[in-house]
Structure formats: structure tokens, C-alpha cells
Image (tube, rainbow, N blue to C red):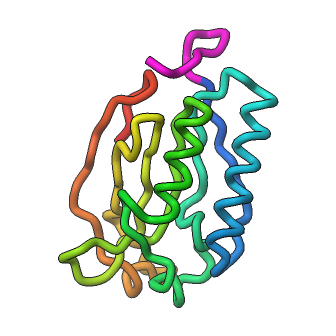
Amino acid sequence: MLSRPGDDGHPVVASLNLSARPAEVHANLTMAQESIVRARQANPSLAWVVLPELFTCAYSALGSVHRYAEDALVGPSARRFVELARGLGIYVVYGFPEWRSGHAGIFDSANLVGPEGVLLTYRKRNLVKTTGENLVFVPGEDLPVVEAGGCGWR
């Protein structure tokens, strides 16, 4: 197990409410990386980091989110966060718009990555009508479950 428990034996989790900038995927990934490294330096017991929904391109730009859709396993966000997770020995959850080969439309997805690579991709099932998500995304169908770093995730 790669997690480093806190004083109570549970993995230390940080939820970073970073303000992603619309359409600036590279800058958002850099901001996340720098923030995660700083959080880890401040707390060496940090084992998990959770970033906001659609963090890579910013939730506020739903009209153009399709431009930033990427493959869950080999897209630029997956590569960047897997490299960071391996380097720090942590787990990262982040939101991104996902394009899947063989599927029409894009998904509002979240990846769980760790030192082992991409461990799980969740595709949002219940799209919010009042925000227009249902007009932009295809709903997911699965409820994936995985155990990683001392925690169950689904």
C-alpha cells in the first residue's frame, strides 16, 4: 500500500478548490501540479488529492468544452497526472471532458490516477438540466469501483 496514513491511521486527503481558467488546459494542469507539489511539501502524509469537476478546461465554459475533450487513458491530462502521481507516490482525482472512441458525444468524466496509472474513469450519470449539462454531455452508465491507496472509490 502506497498511502501514508495520518495520525489516526487514515490516508490524508486534500480537496483543492482551484479556479481553473476556461480554455487554458495547459495552464490549469500546471496550476494543479504546482499546487499539489506545494500541498505535499506542506504535509508529507498527503496521500490523496481531489480536484474540481471539469477542472482541466473549467466548468464555466460548457459551450466550448467539446474542444478540450480527451481520451481518459492517454490524453494530456492523464499523462500529466499519472507522472505526478508516480513522482509523489499519491493518488489524484480530477475532472475533464472525455472523448471515447466509438461513442457519440462527450462525457463529463473524472479520472482516478495513482502510481499504477489510470485506475478508474467515472462518467457522470445524472446530468444537471438547469445548467445545460444534459445538452452538452452524454450520460455515463457504469458505477465503477476500485480500491486504491487504502480507500475504496466509486
Q: Is residue 67 above or below residue 58?
A: below
Left-right relation of 120 to 115: left
Horizontal side, residue 44 vs residue 116: left or right: right
Q: Which residues are magenta?
A: 1-11
Q: Residue at x 58, y 17 (%)?
A: 4
Queried whether the magenta region covers residue 134, the answer comes back as: no
Residue 9 is covered by the magenta coloring: yes
**Prevailing SS of the magenta stretch:** loop
Which residue shows up at 21% across the image and 77% down it? 103
68 up-or-down from 6: above or below: below
Quadrant for the N terminus, please: top left
Where is residue 72? Give x, y as percent. 37, 61
Identity of the residue drawn at 24% across and 74% down: 101
Q: Position of residue 6 (x, y in %)?
A: 64, 15
Where residue 140 sits: x, y (%)?
27, 65
- Quadrant for residue 53, please give it: bottom right
Which one is in front, 103 or 130?
Answer: 103
